[in-house]
C-alpha cells in the first residue's frame, strides 16, 4: 500500500487520499482492481466492492469539487471516470475474467477464435429458434420455444461461469494452461450473452400482452 | 445556510446558486434556503415562466406570461415549445415545424433557426431569453440580488447535442452553468430528501414535450441511477395534437384547405386543444372552442374523457415501451420496484396515472407538485455543488451508447448506454498509408447497428501525426463523458508522446464564436426587452394618473384658475394620446408622464387642501 505524498496516510486507492482528500493524477493509469483498492481475484465480495466504490466516490466525485476551480474539477472528473470504469469491469464476471486472463499473459479473445464444431452446431440451432420466434406472433408455439431456449441458455451460462470460477480460483500462475482454457469458456460466454441479448430485444420489440 | 453572502462590489450573491427547470411549456427557478429547496416567486407571482416568446413589431421580444397571453391576439408572432428544437437539425423537426407560425432555416452546422420579424433566432438564443427571464424573476424574489450560478435540468434521454445546446443557451444568457442535471434524477433528489427513502424507485416524467423513465436505487443518501430510457419527442404537446387533428378534420367541411393550414390558425387550434385537455383532467367531458368571426367560423365540439383516452392510448403505450426497456437494462421486473414517482404536468392526465399504476402494480406518488419537483431537485443539486453537503451522492448514467463509425458503416460501441458518469474509454487509431499525418473519425450516439441510423455527434480530424510508415503511429483517443453527460475528446500520439490536434465539426451545434456573438446580442436584446416592458409600464402608469386627474378635476376643477385648468386638461389629453399611440417609445412616454405629473401639481395641492379642510371640520377622510 502506497502512502499519501501530502499527509503520509496509507492510501486505499491510488486515486485519492481518504485522510486529506488530495486527488492524484497517476500515470500510467492504475488497474481496475487498484482503483478500488482490491487485490486481483476472480472471487470477490460484491458488498465490499460496493462499499469501496461508494467510499471512493464520496471523495473524488466532481459534485464535491464544484467550488474548487477548473483544475480540481478536471482531476475529479478523471478520477471518477477511472473509478466508474473500474467498478463496471470488476462487478461483471465476464469482463473481470477477461481482464485477469489478459493480465496474466493468457490469450486475447481473438487469439482463440476456434470453437468446437459441436458448439457451433448448437449455436446454429439457437439462431433457428430465434428466427422462427422473430417471424411469429407473441403467444404462438414458436414463442414458447423461445422461453425454453432462454432457460437453457441461462443454465449454460451458469455452468460456464462455474467452470471459469474453477479455472481462475485460485488465480493461476502467469502463462498457465488454465488461462487458455478460461479463454475458451469466455468465448463461449460471448455467444451465450449475444443470444440472450437477442431474445431480450425480441421480447421488448413485440411484448406479450400483460 | 441561513444567510446570503453578498459581494458588495457588484451586488452578486457569491454563495447562491439557482436550480432551473427549463421546460417545454413552463420554466421555473428554485433555491436552497434554510435547509430545504424552495421555489422562487416574486411577490404576487407564481414563479412559473411560460416558455413562450412574443416578437414585437420593433424587434423587442417578450418572454413568459405576457407572451403567452399575446399568443391569442397575435399567434403569428408567438413561439412555444422551443425545447423540442434544441440540438436538432431541420430534418429532425419536420413534424414540429408544422405548428411553428414562422419560416425555419438552418445554419451551416445544422442548427435550426426561426425567422421572426426579419431576424433569425436559434433555439439556443430563444432558450437563453427564457433562462434570463427565470433568473430575473428569481432576482426579484431575492430583493434584487444578482444570481449567476445555475444548475439547469434536461430530459435524461437528451443526447450530447441537446445537452450542449442547453449549456450554450445558459452561456448566451450570461449564466455560469455549474451542472446539467437529468430531470428525473433531480425529481428523485427532491423526493428522497423529504423522507429517507430506501429501495428501487421508478421516476416517470412526462412533460410538455419529452418523456423520461429512470430507475434508481436509493440508500443512505446515495442516489444511483440504474438505467434510463425515454423519448425526447413525446409529451403533452402530442396529446394536444390528437385533438387538433380531430378539429382539423371536422373543420375541413367549413374552411378552405389553405386556411386550415394557416400557421396562425394552427397556433389557435393548439391553444384551444390544450385548454380542452386540461379540463378533461378534472371533468368527464369538455368543449373545444374555435371562434373566427372574420371568416364566420364558430366551432364547438364536445370531447369525453373516454374519447380522449382512445385518441391518446398509443402515446401512453409508447411511454410504457420505454419503461420496459429501462427495467430490462436495470435487470428488474416491474414488481421489484418499491416506489413509483410521477413528474411533469402531463402526468395529471387520468389515463396516464391509471396505466402507470397498472404497469407497475402500485399506486404512484404524486405528493409533490409535478410542475415544481424538478426545479426543487435542481436546487438540491446546486446546494451540493456549492459545497453545502456531502450527504447526497448522485451517480447518474449516460442514456445512449457512444460509438465510432467503422469502415463498413457499422458502429463500434466504446461506451455502453447506462454507464455511470463520469466515464471514459480510450481507443487506439493508426494510419493506413506511409507518412499519413491525419486521421478522420466519426462519433455517433445511439443503439442502432448502423452509423447512419444513430445520431452524429460530429466528425473529428486528428492532425499533426508524425510522418511514419503505415500502421506505426499509435494515437490514443480518449472519450470522456463528464458529469453533465457531455462528451470531450482528447488525443495523444503514443510513439512520440505528442498530443495530436483535434478539429471537430459539431453536428447541430454552435461553435464557440457563435455562442460569443449571441451572448453579446442577448444583452442588446435584453435592453430592448427592458425598454418594451418599461414602455408598457409607462402606458399603464399614464392611464392610472389620467383617471385620478379626471376624478380630481370633477371634484376640485372649479376651484382652479382658468389658466391652470386649461394646462391640466391639455397635458392630460396629450398624455392619453401618447399612451394610446403604440409607435411611441420609452423616452417620449416618459416625457408625457412627467409633464402630466408637473401640470397636475396645483390640482393635487388643491385636493390636499380640501382633505385638510375636511379633516379640520371634523369630517372623516372617506367622507370627503
Image: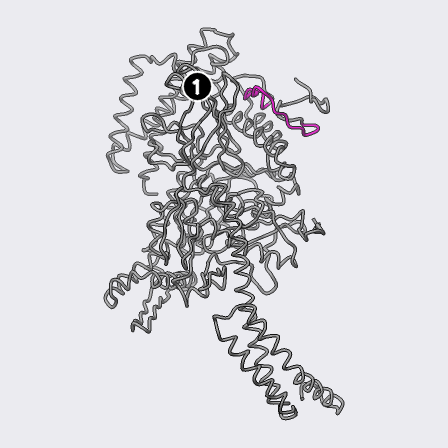
Q: What residue is at 41 percent from the left and 25 percent from the top?
A: B439
- Numbered disc 1: what chain? A
Image height of A202 relative to B582, above or below? above
Our reading of the magenta stretch's main secondary structure is loop
Residue that label 1 marks: A161
- Asked if residue B279 lies left or right of residue B573, the reply is left
- Mark 1, other Cα within 10 Å: few <14 / some 14–19 / many ≥20: some
Magenta stretch encompasses residue A24: yes
Residue nearest the observer in this picture, B147 or B500: B500
Say whether residue B33 is visible. yes
Residue nearest the observer in this picture, B563 or B581: B563
Query: What colouring does the structure picture have?
Result: one colour
Image height of A180 relative to A36, above or below? above
How many numbered marks, from 0 up?
1
Q: What residue is at 71 percent from the left and 23 percent from the top?
A: A9
Say whether residue B2 is visible. no
- Asked if residue A92 lies left or right of residue A15, the reply is left
Question: Under tag 1, what secondary structure?
Answer: helix
Residue nearest the observer in this picture, B577 or B159: B577
- Asked if residue A128 lies left or right of residue B395, the reply is left
Q: What residue is at 51 percent from the left and 17 percent from the top?
A: B496
Specify the segment rendered in magenta. Answer: A18-36
Magenta stretch encompasses residue A179: no
Amino acid at each position: 500500500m502506497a502512502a499519501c505524498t501530502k499527509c503520509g496516510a496509507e492510501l486505499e486507492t491510488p486515486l485519492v487520499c481518504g485522510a486529506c482528500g488530495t486527488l492524484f493524477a497517476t500515470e500510467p493509469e492504475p488497474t481496475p482492481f487498484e482503483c478500488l483498492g482490491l487485490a486481483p481475484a476472480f472471487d470477490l465480495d460484491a458488498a465490499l466492492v460496493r462499499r469501496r466504490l461508494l467510499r471512493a466516490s464520496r471523495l473524488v466525485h466532481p459534485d464535491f469539487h464544484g467550488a474548487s476551480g477548473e483544475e480540481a474539477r478536471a482531476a475529479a472528473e478523471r478520477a471518477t471516470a477511472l473509478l466508474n470504469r473500474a467498478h463496471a469491469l470488476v462487478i461483471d464476471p465476464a469482463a473481470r475474467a477477461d481482464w485477469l486472463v489478459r493480465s496474466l499473459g493468457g490469450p486475447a479473445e481473438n487469439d482463440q477464435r476456434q470453437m468446437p464444431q459441436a458448439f457451433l452446431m448448437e449455436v446454429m440451432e439457437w439462431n433457428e429458434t430465434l428466427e422462427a420466434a422473430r417471424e411469429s406472433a407473441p403467444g404462438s408455439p414458436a414463442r414458447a420455444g423461445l422461453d425454453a431456449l432462454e432457460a437453457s441458455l441461462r443454465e449454460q451460462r451458469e455452468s460456464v461461469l462455474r467452470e471459469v470460477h474453477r479455472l481462475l480460483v485460485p488465480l493461476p500462475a502467469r502463462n498457465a494452461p488454465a488461462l487458455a482454457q478460461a479463454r475458451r469458456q469466455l468465448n463461449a460466454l460471448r455467444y451465450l450473452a449475444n443470444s440472450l441479448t437477442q431474445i431480450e430485444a425480441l421480447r421488448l420489440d413485440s411484448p406479450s400482452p400483460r | 445556510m441561513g444567510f446570503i453572502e453578498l459581494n458588495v462590489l457588484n451586488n452578486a450573491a457569491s454563495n447562491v446558486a439557482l436550480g432551473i427547470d427549463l421546460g417545454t411549456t413552463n420554466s421555473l427557478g428554485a433555491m436552497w434556503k434554510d435547509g430545504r429547496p424552495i421555489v422562487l416567486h416574486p411577490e404576487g407571482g407564481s414563479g412559473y415562466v411560460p416558455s413562450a416568446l412574443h416578437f414585437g413589431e420593433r424587434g423587442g421580444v417578450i418572454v413568459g406570461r405576457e407572451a403567452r397571453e399575446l399568443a391569442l391576439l397575435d399567434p403569428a408572432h408567438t413561439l412555444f415549445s422551443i425545447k423540442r428544437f434544441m440540438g436538432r437539425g431541420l430534418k429532425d423537426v419536420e413534424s414540429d415545424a408544422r405548428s411553428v407560425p414562422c419560416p425555419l432555416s438552418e445554419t451551416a452546422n445544422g442548427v435550426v433557426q426561426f425567422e421572426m420579424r426579419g431576424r433569425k433566432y436559434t433555439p439556443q438564443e430563444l432558450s437563453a431569453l427564457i433562462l434570463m427571464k427565470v433568473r430575473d424573476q428569481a432576482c426579484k424574489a431575492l430583493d434584487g440580488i444578482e444570481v449567476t450560478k445555475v444548475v439547469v435540468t434536461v430530459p435524461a434521454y437528451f443526447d450530447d447535442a441537446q445537452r450542449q445546446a442547453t449549456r450554450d443557451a445558459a452561456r448566451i444568457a450570461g449564466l455560469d452553468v455549474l451542472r446539467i442535471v437529468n430531470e428525473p434524477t433531480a425529481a428523485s433528489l427532491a423526493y428522497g430528501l423529504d423522507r429517507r427513502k430506501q429501495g428501487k424507485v421508478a421516476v416517470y416524467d412526462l412533460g410538455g414535450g419529452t418523456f423520461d423513465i429512470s430507475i434508481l436505487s436509493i440508500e443512505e443518501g446515495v442516489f444511483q441511477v440504474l438505467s434510463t430510457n425515454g423519448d425526447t419527442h413525446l409529451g403533452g404537446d402530442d396529446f394536444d395534437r390528437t385533438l387538433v387533428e380531430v378539429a382539423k378534420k371536422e373543420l375541413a367541411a367549413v374552411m378552405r384547405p389553405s386556411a386550415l393550414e394557416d400557421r396562425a390558425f394552427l397556433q389557435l387550434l393548439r391553444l384551444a386543444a390544450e385548454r380542452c385537455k386540461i379540463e378533461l383532467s378534472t371533468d368527464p367531458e369538455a368543449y373545444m372552442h374555435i371562434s373566427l368571426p372574420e371568416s364566420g367560423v364558430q366551432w364547438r365540439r364536445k370531447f369525453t374523457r373516454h374519447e380522449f383516452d382512445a385518441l391518446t392510448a398509443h402515446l401512453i403505450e409508447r411511454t410504457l415501451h420505454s419503461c420496459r426497456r429501462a427495467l430490462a437494462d436495470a435487470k428488474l421486473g416491474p414488481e421489484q420496484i418499491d416506489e413509483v414517482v410521477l413528474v411533469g404536468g402531463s402526468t395529471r392526465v387520468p389515463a396516464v396515472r391509471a396505466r402507470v399504476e397498472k404497469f407497475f402494480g402500485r399506486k404512484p406518488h404524486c405528493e409533490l407538485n409535478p410542475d415544481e419537483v424538478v426545479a426543487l431537485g435542481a436546487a438540491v443539486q446546486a446546494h451540493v455543488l456549492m459545497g453545502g453537503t456531502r450527504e447526497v451522492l448522485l451517480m447518474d448514467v449516460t442514456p445512449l451508447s457512444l460509438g465510432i463509425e467503422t469502415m463498413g458503416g457499422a458502429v463500434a460501441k466504446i461506451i455502453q448506454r447506462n454507464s455511470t458518469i463520469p466515464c471514459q474509454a480510450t481507443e487506439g487509431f493508426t494510419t493506413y498509408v506511409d507518412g499519413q499525418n491525419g486521421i478522420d473519425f466519426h462519433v455517433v450516439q445511439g443503439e442502432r447497428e448502423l452509423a447512419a441510423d444513430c445520431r452524429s455527434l460530429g466528425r473529428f480530424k486528428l492532425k499533426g501525426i508524425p510522418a511514419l510508415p503505415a500502421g506505426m503511429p499509435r494515437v490514443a483517443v480518449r472519450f470522456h463523458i463528464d458529469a453533465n453527460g457531455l462528451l470531450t475528446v482528447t488525443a495523444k500520439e503514443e510513439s512520440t508522446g505528442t498530443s495530436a490536434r483535434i478539429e471537430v465539426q459539431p453536428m447541430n451545434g454552435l461553435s464557440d464564436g457563435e455562442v460569443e456573438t449571441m451572448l453579446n446580442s442577448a444583452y442588446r436584446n435584453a435592453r430592448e426587452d427592458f425598454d418594451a416592458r418599461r414602455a408598457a409600464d409607462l402606458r399603464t402608469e399614464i392611464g392610472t394618473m389620467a383617471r385620478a386627474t379626471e376624478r380630481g378635476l370633477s371634484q376640485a376643477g372649479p376651484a382652479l384658475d382658468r389658466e391652470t385648468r386649461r394646462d391640466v386638461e391639455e397635458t392630460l389629453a396629450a398624455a392619453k394620446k401618447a399612451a394610446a399611440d403604440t409607435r411611441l417609445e420609452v423616452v417620449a412616454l416618459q416625457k408625457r408622464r412627467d409633464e402630466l405629473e408637473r401640470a397636475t401639481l396645483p390640482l393635487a395641492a388643491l385636493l390636499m387642501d380640501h382633505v385638510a379642510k375636511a379633516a379640520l371640520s371634523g369630517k372623516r377622510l372617506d367622507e370627503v
